[in-house]
Image (cartoon, grey):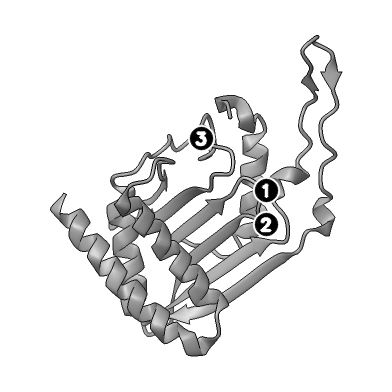
């Protein structure tokens, strides 16, 4: 698809923020934007009690249908230049939002944070005054991943991973998928996902540290 596919990308991005950013997500966040399936956001938050002890939570939010198709698109033209009506937008008021919030321990939160910081420092970071979808190519049937993380200096950095996959990027995406399963599967299975996520995050961090 051409760069101008998201002509209304700011409206789309604002809709994602309004409907799916249901927690601050200022510790770490993943935004998954498929071509046709519903979007998904994973947000990691740290809540500090009066004694200074932090508790960590990961929140999954997902709409029942892709939010992009609720936005009216300008009519296209056919080969003769005549206008062709755009598709009828899906009613936004018919979309429900799934929200799951589960606790994670400090070690797992630290593993997420370190992996995000290391990967984002190597990713394509758009200008701060532009929404992350602006001027970017989205491939048909391709899922695009965006990540944000709080850096050690307290700044929030945002990055889009390239569409062209490498072994490292694919592993990074699998880690995000592991956290999705951690939220959605029964609590009895979370110990297994935790072990796998810690091991895989450590492996990625070790490899990135050598680069």
Q: Are marks 1 and 2 in contact (CB under 8 Å)?
A: yes
Tell me the residue that label 2 is attached to: 19
Where residue 115 sits: x, y (%)? Answer: 31, 61
Q: Residue furthest top?
A: 80
- Is 69 above or below relative to 44? above
**Residue 117 lies in what quarter of the image?**
bottom left
The CA span between labels 1 and 2 is 6 Å
Where residue 90 sits: x, y (%)? Answer: 82, 47
Sequence order check, earlier mark of 3 and 2: 2
Element class at badge 2: helix
Where residue 188 sits: x, y (%)? Answer: 49, 90
Residue 15 circle label: 1
Element class at badge 3: loop
Q: Residues within 10 Å of mark 2 (few under 14, many from 20)?
A: some
Tell me the residue that label 3 is attached to: 130
The CA span between labels 3 and 2 is 19 Å
**Position of residue 116 in the picture relative to residue 45 (left or right):** left
The CA span between labels 1 and 3 is 15 Å
Q: Residues within 10 Å of mark 1 (few under 14, many from 20)?
A: some
Between 54 and 41, the one lying in front of the other is: 41
Element class at badge 1: helix
Residue at the (43%, 82%) spot, across then down:
49
């Amino acid at each position: 698809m051409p760069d101008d596919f998201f002509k209304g990308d700011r409206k789309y991005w604002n809709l994602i923020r309004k409907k799916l950013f249901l927690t601050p997500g200022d510790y770490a966040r993943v935004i998954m934007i498929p071509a046709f399936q519903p979007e998904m956001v994973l947000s990691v938050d740290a809540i500090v009690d009066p004694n200074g002890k932090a508790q960590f939570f990961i929140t999954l939010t997902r709409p029942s249908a892709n939010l992009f198709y609720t936005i009216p698109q300008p009519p296209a033209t056919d080969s003769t230049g005549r206008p062709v009506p755009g598709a009828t937008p899906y009613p936004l008021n018919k979309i429900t939002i799934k929200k799951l919030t589960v606790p994670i321990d400090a070690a797992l939160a630290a593993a997420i944070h370190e992996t995000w910081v290391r990967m984002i420092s190597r990713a394509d970071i758009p200008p701060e005054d532009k929404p992350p979808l602006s001027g970017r190519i989205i491939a048909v049937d391709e899922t695009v991943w965006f990540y944000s993380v709080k850096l050690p200096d307290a700044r929030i950095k945002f990055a889009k991973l390239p569409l062209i996959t490498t072994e490292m990027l694919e592993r990074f995406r699998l880690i995000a998928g592991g956290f999705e399963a951690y939220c959605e599967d029964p609590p009895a299975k979370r110990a297994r996902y935790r072990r796998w996520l810690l091991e895989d995050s450590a492996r990625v961090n070790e490899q990135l540290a050598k680069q």
